[in-house]
Amino acid sequence: MVRLPKTKEDARGDRRMAAALLLGLGALLFAALTRYHWRHVCDDAFIAFLAAGLGPVWNRGEAVEGYSSPLWLGLLVVGRLLGAALPAWAGALGVGFALLCLVLVGGYVLLYERIAG
C-alpha cells in the first residue's frame, strides 16, 4: 500500500530517503565494478605508461609526441616520480576520480534538496 505524504515535511523526508538510497546504490555498484575491473588495463593505457617512462615521445630520440592526453600523462609522471607502479597508480587515480564524482553528485543532490525544499 502506498502512503501519500500528509505534509510538506513528509514529502521532503521521502525525497531525502530516495536520494540516500540512490546514492547508496550507486556507491555499492561502484564498489562492485571497481573490484571487478581493477585487474583489467586497457591496451591504450600503455601508450601513456610508455610516454611517462621515456618522456613525451613514443621512441627514444624522436621528436614526435606519443600521447594524446597531456593532463593524464602529467598525473602518471607524478606517480612515476613517487616510485609507484604505473598500472596501479592509474587504477588508483581512476578510482579516486570516480569517488570524487560520487561525492560531487551527492553534494549536488543535497544542494538541490536545500534549494527546492
Image: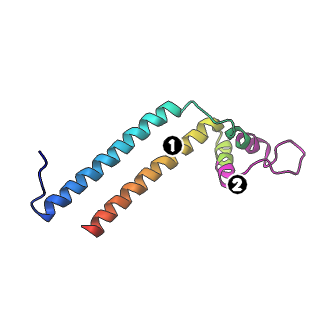
Q: Position of residue 65 (x, y in %)?
A: 81, 51
Residue furthest front as drawn:
1
User: Please, what secondary structure does the residue beneath circle 1 have?
Assistant: helix
82 to 32, vertically: above or below: below
Which of the two residues, 20 or 93, is positioned nearer the viewer here? 20
- Seen at 87% across and 42% down, the residue is 60
User: Does 48 sit left or right of 38 as displayed?
Assistant: right
Residue furthest right as drawn:
61
User: Does 16 sit left or right of 106 as displayed?
Assistant: left
- Would residue 115 be counted in the magenta stretch? no
- Magenta stretch in the rendered image: 49-75
Query: What's the residue type where badge 2 is placed?
Result: Pro
User: Please, what secondary structure does the residue beneath circle 2 have?
Assistant: helix
Instruction: Using a 10 Å C-alpha cutoff, classify the residue at mark 1 as few (fewer than 14 neighbours), some (14 to 19) or many (20 or more).
Output: some
- Would residue 69 be counted in the magenta stretch? yes
Residue furthest left as drawn:
6
- Seen at 42% across and 37% down, the residue is 31
19 to 90, vertically: above or below: below
The N terminus appears in which quarter of the rendering? top left
| Mark 2 lies on residue | 70
- Seen at 51% across and 49% down, the residue is 97
The picture quadrant where one finds residue 48 is: top right
- Seen at 41% across and 53% down, the residue is 103
On residue 28, the disc is none
Give the CA distance from mark 1 to mark 2.
19 Å
| Mark 1 lies on residue | 95
